Amino acid sequence: MRHLSIVLLAVAAPAVLHAECPTGADLASGIAFTGLDGDREVFTDLGDGIVSASYLYPNGFRTEALLAQGAFLIELLDLVGSDGETRTKYSFPLEIKEIQPPEPGESWDVTVSVSDGDHNVFERQIYSFGSIEQHSYGGCTYDVIPFTAEYSTLPEVVETYHFLPALGLSYLYSYVDPVGEATYPYTKIEALR
């Protein structure tokens, strides 16, 4: 009988661990990712197709972003609490609810109005969505659609994002410009309940 209890416990353990991994329902109260250097990003569903992303730098500064469908930047408040604080708004030519989330193998070429309060420009943005991959964050594994974003106003910059369809959010994974490149891998995920 004791042997059967151990076997049942061993079979149930992965289910318990899996149950602790965040789901799309957890986005209402917040889902946090943590990186190797102590950087942390918290995503929260604000409703009406908008997800907020709050990125906390190890030095205490933070960036606040609003994402349409959890993937496309519509507002960025950068380095909150610093002298270099800036706010930029991105207006798409369609309603937020009409914007489609990333789909594997698809692309989106769109012209966006970009305003920082003093200046306004129209920017062509090209999104290229890759094939589904699997990525692990601690003991949690999710399907991920990697996608690149390129901008006409920054022709030598390519950003790569990871979109997690099950959670309805994406985060910046890498950034390449003429000076070099940076990668921002996350190693842990948790629901903020």
Image (cartoon, rainbow, N blue to C red):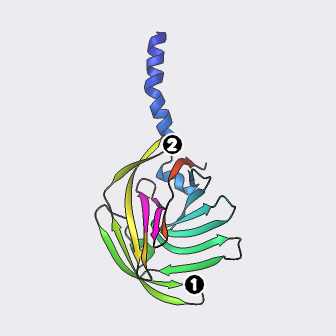
142 lies above or below 183? above
| Residue 86 to residue 136: above or below | below
Query: What segment carries the magenta color?
Result: 159-178
Which residue matches tag 2? 138
In this view, which residue lies farthest toward the top?
1
Q: In this orientation, does residue 137 appear?
A: yes
Q: Residue at x 28, y 63 (%)?
A: 105
Asked if residue 171 is among those painted magenta in the image, a careful observer would answer: yes
Determine crowd level at label 1: few under 14, some 14-19, many 20+ residues with C-alpha closer than 10 A: some
Q: Would you say the magenta stretch is mainly helix, strand or loop?
A: strand
Q: Is residue 80 magenta?
A: no
Quadrant position of residue 119: bottom right
Q: Position of residue 125 (x, y in %)?
A: 39, 78
The answer to whether residue 145 is above or below residue 13 is below
Q: Earlier in the sequence, mark 1 or mark 2?
A: 1
**Which residue is identified by label 1?**
116
The crowd level at tag 2 (other Cα within 10 Å; few <14, some 14-19, many 20+) is: few
Q: Is residue 91 left or right of residue 192?
A: left
Decide if residue 70 is in sight here: no
Q: Secondary structure at mark 2?
A: loop
At which x and y percent is residue 51?
Answer: 52, 65
Q: What secondary structure is found at the residue carrying circle 1?
A: loop
